[in-house]
Image: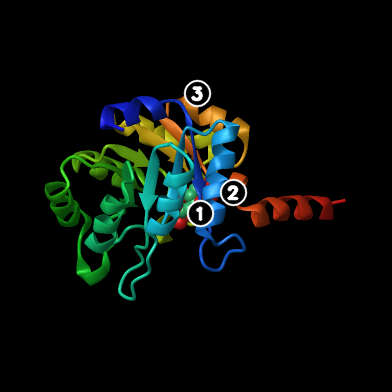
């Protein structure tokens, strides 16, 4: 699929994140492939996935554009979503239409800084689409300057600066601030856990929306039920 086609396909649509880490009950590339198929049957137009193994299985199972990431922890950095060139190289090989990476201003492994790192990435892979996973408006503005193709709110609430914050707070105030600050397509991602929230972020003007756990992490879905009934 050409980049222009990918953009057109995803516009105003739903992407489902199909991820299960090693310590999760559904950890299995086969299962992630079936999750992607279920997502497609339900109307998803794209898939977000972690690891080359999962992406390969998903691409065998459904013909949908993929946002690929590799989550990898390094001892010298808090950055874990596609932190280094090793993960970028592997994702390019996997054929992921879009590669997402941590675009916070935190130090990357081996004391690398985002701006220098991403310049090198773009020089190496000028035709690849990239998504910036950010947590603050400042990071969104920086990612726009770096010429990322998409900016996602993925890490809002997951960094030291933003912990305890939720994208839906104050009728999506953070998201509105991001949308007012940049012109690059914004992808709403992270804790969009109801169909109503997905609709609301599209009304506010995001390019498309990614939903993960609320669709593909049954242990979290179950927890929401089991905790609710305890209120009785
Ligand atoms: C913070 C982080 O590591 N987020 C990850 C990024 O890929 C995934 O674990 C999330 O499931 C994904 O962003 C979708 O979000 P939610 O599952 O809340 O709909």
- Numbered badge on residue 203: 3
Which residue, given by chain and number where applicable, does mark 2 sit on? Answer: 216
Disc on the earlier residue, 1 or 3:
1
> Ligand 1: does it lie within 8 Å of the C-beta at label 2?
yes
Q: Quadrant of residue 6?
A: top left
Q: Is residue 3 visible?
A: yes
> Ligand 1: does it lie within 8 Å of the C-beta at label 1?
yes
Disc on the earlier residue, 2 or 1:
1
| Residue appearing at x 32%, y 37% in the figure | 150
Quick check: marks 3 and 2 in contact, CB under 8 Å? no
Q: Answer above or below: position of 22 versus 125.
A: below
Which residue, given by chain and number where applicable, does mark 1 sit on? Answer: 19
Q: Is residue 212 visible?
A: no
Disc on the earlier residue, 3 or 2:
3
CA separation in Å, label 3 and label 2: 24 Å
On the image, the x and y values in percent for residue 206 come to: 42, 29
Q: Answer above or below: position of 80 versus 11.
A: below
84 and 165: which is toward the camera: 84
| Residue appearing at x 31%, y 42% in the figure | 140
In the rendered structure, the answer to whether residue 58 lies left or right of residue 216 reads left
Q: Quadrant of residue 105?
A: bottom left
| Residue appearing at x 20%, y 39% in the figure | 147
CA separation in Å, label 1 and label 3: 27 Å
């Amino acid at each position: 699929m050409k980049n222009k086609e990918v953009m057109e396909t995803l516009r105003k649509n739903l992407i489902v994140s199909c991820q299960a880490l090693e310590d999760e009950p559904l950890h299995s590339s086969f299962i992630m492939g079936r999750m992607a198929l279920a997502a497609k049957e339900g109307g998803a137009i794209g898939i977000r996935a972690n690891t080359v193994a999962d992406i390969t299985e998903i691409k065998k199972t459904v013909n949908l554009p993929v946002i690929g990431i590799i989550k990898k922890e390094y001892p010298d950095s808090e950055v874990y979503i596609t932190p280094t060139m090793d993960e970028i190289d592997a994702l390019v090989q996997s054929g992921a239409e879009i590669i997402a990476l941590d675009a916070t201003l935190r130090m990357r492994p081996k004391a690398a800084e985002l701006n220098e790192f991403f310049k090198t990435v773009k020089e190496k892979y000028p035709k690849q689409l990239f998504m910036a996973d950010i947590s603050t408006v400042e990071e969104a503005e920086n990612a726009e300057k770096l010429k990322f193709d998409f900016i996602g709110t993925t890490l809002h609430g997951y960094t030291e600066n933003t912990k305890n914050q939720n994208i839906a707070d104050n009728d999506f105030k953070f998201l509105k601030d991001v949308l007012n600050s940049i012109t690059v397509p914004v992808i709403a991602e992270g804790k969009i856990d109801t169909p109503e929230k997905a609709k609301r972020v599209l009304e506010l003007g995001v390019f498309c929306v990614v939903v993960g756990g609320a669709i593909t992490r049954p242990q979290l879905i179950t927890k929401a039920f089991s905790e609710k009934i305890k209120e009785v």
